[in-house]
Image (cartoon, rainbow, N blue to C red):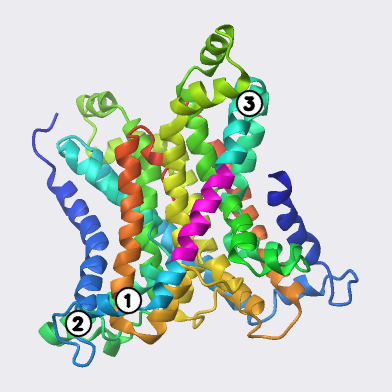
Amino acid sequence: MRRWIAPGAVVWLLVGAAYFLVPLVATLLFSLRRNETGACCTLANYGVILHDPQFWTNIRVSFVLALETIVISLLLLVPTVYWVNLKLPRLRPVIAFLAVVPFVVPPIVLVVGLLDLYRGTPDWFYAEPYGFLVVAYVIIAFPYIYFALDAGFRAIDIHTLTEASQSLGASWWTTITRVILPNVKAAAVAGALLTLAIVMGEYTIASLGAFDTFPVYIQYIAQNKAYPAAALTLLSFGITWAAMVAIALGGRRRQAAIVAGGR
Amino acid sequence: MLGFLLLPAGQVLVGAFRDPEGGWTLDNLATLFDEPYRTAYRNSIEVSLVTALAGGFLGFMIAYSAIRDGTPRWLRSVFTTFSGVAANFAGIPLAFAFIATLGTIGIVTQLLADTLGWDPYDHGFSLFSKTGIELAYLYFQIPLMLLVISPAIDGLKREWREAAANLGATPAQFWLHVGLPVLMPSLLGAAILLFGNSFAAYATAYGLTAGGVSLVPITIGYLLSGDVLSNPHLGQALALGMFAVLAVMMLLYVPLQRRASRWSR
């Protein structure tokens, strides 16, 4: 066994670190430039963003969308995954297959289908982000939440827990809320954070559906104000970063599953 | 849940064969082989292949360097965490980060021009081209590769390497005859994932070039946003074409996978 790091490994790790860090450092320097002269250094660009009411409107829309997506997904999937793992284990491969479908269908294809499918539905659904977009985002979040929950349910012995709870006279409702949920809380939180990061960054469907979300705002600023756009980019990176670090701290077991997002 | 998922996909399938009057037709699909759609498909496939291969290679080398004996353990967790972030950092912000870095007035562009007197834009480079899109895609392709291939590299047992060395094999011989064949199924799977990942990407390319480079998702976006007034079924046909390309990749993958995993167990 080697005691020192191999020279070849150092080279590749440096290449990797540079590829990751150079664009971030460049964006940081870019965001500190003065608007008129392009010289360093000022925080004015951050002020421009924070004082733009449109920024607060759009980021709020995206945040509420994310919360709505998370709540609907968990309400749909927690009972489903619980029931499938408990009573219908033969259905697991079927659900797992369905969960891969949103991975395979590109968002651009999804939006083609959805816009057409829901054409003619009432305006309160079709023209509102909290209607149409949430449907799209629940679909996109499905695999992330499903695989997180499935891993969580498989890590605990739900049969024993359920039987123990029921033999002590607990109802189904008590069993689920007092016994099962606390045990899968970590998995649900991981799935929710991942969903938050994805929804806060999703551009394809939001822009083609003509909704004003956070990424749509970033694109609007990027076309009009270069230096403030760099400040926004870093902010958006910070959101992704915070969500990922929270997941890594919450559950160290399943890091490999944290993959892909807004693209 | 089922309806949510399958209805839009079905809608695309059926819509691709419809004409504006509601009748059945193959014209939409035939149009895919005409310009400008032929170029869009060629560009998309080219960009996806390049970033899958380059990203796969770089991601593998970095993953192996982070895991191999001698590299401190904390370095590996740093790289894994960073990769989790970078693989999810895509779309409009990623595009803008590259504009701030390598755009015409980007930090690195200016640094090269001021200190070395070598402006990449005078030498045929442009961020707003296929090369630029590939560079930006690699930012999420490399970490994705690192995340998916790491468990497979963990599965390479140290004993195999020591056994090979004891029998007189050079490191090159070990990789050629033991390491790569064992990893081949995982490498192929990862390459397919990377191809699909970049084939589906829309926001990054749009943010970078605003549609200047013709890719299939960008073209669909144009048709949808009504910049080009035309037949909505053409967008569905293009979407169906994307399915077809991904399906062909899967069909190539299955026999390769079977051959590669022939002797693992």
Q: Specify whether A183 is left or right of B112.
A: right
| Residue ID at (29%, 80%) | A48
Of residues B59 and A107, which is closer to you in this image? A107
Q: Which circle's residue, 1 or 3, is located before the other in the chain?
A: 1
Position of residue B240 relative to residue B42, above or below, is above
Q: Position of residue A144 (x, y in %)?
A: 50, 44
Q: Identify residue type, mark 3.
A: Trp
Q: CA distance from mark 2 to mark 1?
A: 14 Å
Q: Identify residue type, mark 2.
A: Arg
Q: Is residue A6 magenta?
A: no
Q: Secondary structure at mark 2?
A: loop
The residue pinned by badge 3 equals A83
* Chain under numbered label 3: A
Q: CA distance from mark 1 to mark 3?
A: 47 Å
The residue pinned by badge 1 equals A49
* Chain under numbered label 2: A
The residue pinned by badge 2 equals A33
Q: Which circle's residue, 2 or 1, is located before the other in the chain?
A: 2
Magenta part mainly helix, strand or loop? helix
Instruction: Give the foreground label among 1 and 3.
Output: 1
**Residue at the limit of the structure toward the bottom, as seen here:** A36
Q: Which residues are magenta?
A: A60-73
Mark 3 residue crowding within 10 angstroms, few (<14) / some (14–19) / many (20+): few
Q: Secondary structure at mark 3?
A: helix
